[in-house]
Image (cartoon, rainbow, N blue to C red):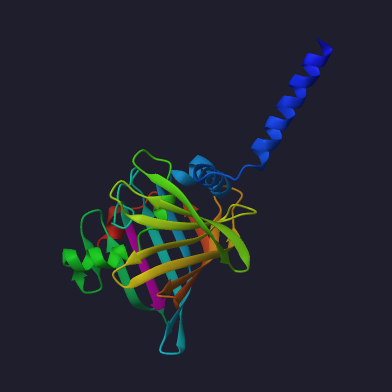
Amino acid sequence: MKQAIALLLLFLALLMSCKKNQPLTATEIIRTAHDKAGGSFWQQPKSLTLKGYGIFYRNGTSVKHETHNMWREFEQTKNAAHQANGKVRIESFRDSTPVFIVTFDGKNTYDLNGKQEKQAADNRWSSNFGYGAIRHALDDGYTLEKVANDTIKNSIAYTIKVTDPNNGETFFGIDTIDFKIVKVAFQTPRGWHHREYSEFFSKPSYSWLQAGRVELFYNGKLSNEVFWEDFEVNEELPDSLFVLK
């Protein structure tokens, strides 16, 4: 009997050792990334406010926008990662003058010239929307695939291809050590777009890990950087915030 128990314990130890040494699946990586970012609170926010500044690069020069803010109101479902949903407002100021303001009220898109024509608006948002796919990556209708690892800021990252129910593809880089979400990449009307996330911070009042620096690239060229200095989650945002007249 003692010999049988010893053999059983040895078998269980070997089984656990083999399991421990098995590579993580795409689902396990995404689930761990969700936990690192803030768990269910991070996955299902009602709204997000981000405030900071931006640096924009054009023709070999850089221009600082001293105010760059975003307000986001989320839908609870997302079937197309690269189509606008929920509500959003992005504004950027230089010398207290608006360089651009663009909003989406759930149906219409507005900028400083007023309401935009739908096709132009859809093209604009398809170059911006994509990150939200990772929040819904474990939802029904989404599929995950683990592809080749990436190197981001000298650190190795898992790469997970997330395909939404509309067959839109978005690639996410997840740090192999701490499971922070450090990259998103997808095809846009402007070409191949990717963003790199770093300088993460949090606040005592929220289970939420926020990237403080976002670098935006198109076709491998740095377009602009956004530095988020503060954030709030689940504020009540008035409908008027998302309409420009």
Q: Please tell me whether residue 91 belongs to the stretch shown in magenta.
A: yes
**Relative horizontal placement of residue 111, taking residue 47 as reference (left or right):** left
Residue in the image at 78% along x and 15% along y: 4
**Relative horizontal placement of residue 194, taking residue 20 as reference (left or right):** left
Main SS class of the magenta portion in the image: strand
User: Residue 204 or 118: which is nearer the viewer?
Assistant: 118
Q: Where residue 141 sits: x, y (%)? A: 34, 41
Q: Which image quadrant for residue 168?
A: bottom left
In the rendered image, the quadrant that contains the C terminus is bottom left
User: Residue 202 or 29: which is nearer the viewer?
Assistant: 29
The outermost residue toward the top is: 1
How many callouts does the rendering have? 0
Q: Where residue 19 sits: x, y (%)? A: 64, 36
Residue in the image at 33% along x and 58% along y: 88
Q: Please tell me whether residue 174 belongs to the stretch shown in magenta.
A: no
User: Residue 170 or 54: which is nearer the viewer?
Assistant: 170
Q: Which residues are magenta?
A: 88-93
Q: Where residue 203 sits: x, y (%)? A: 59, 53
The outermost residue toward the right is: 2
Q: Where residue 151 sits: x, y (%)? A: 57, 65
Residue in the image at 25% along x and 61% along y: 243
Q: Is residue 108 above or below residue 101?
A: above
Q: Which image quadrant for residue 244?
A: bottom left
The outermost residue toward the bottom is: 60
Residue 244 is at least partly visible in this image? no
In the rendered image, the quadrant that contains the N terminus is top right
Q: Is residue 116 above or below residue 162?
A: below
**Relative horizontal placement of residue 174, taking residue 103 as reference (left or right):** right
Q: Is residue 58 above or below residue 1?
A: below
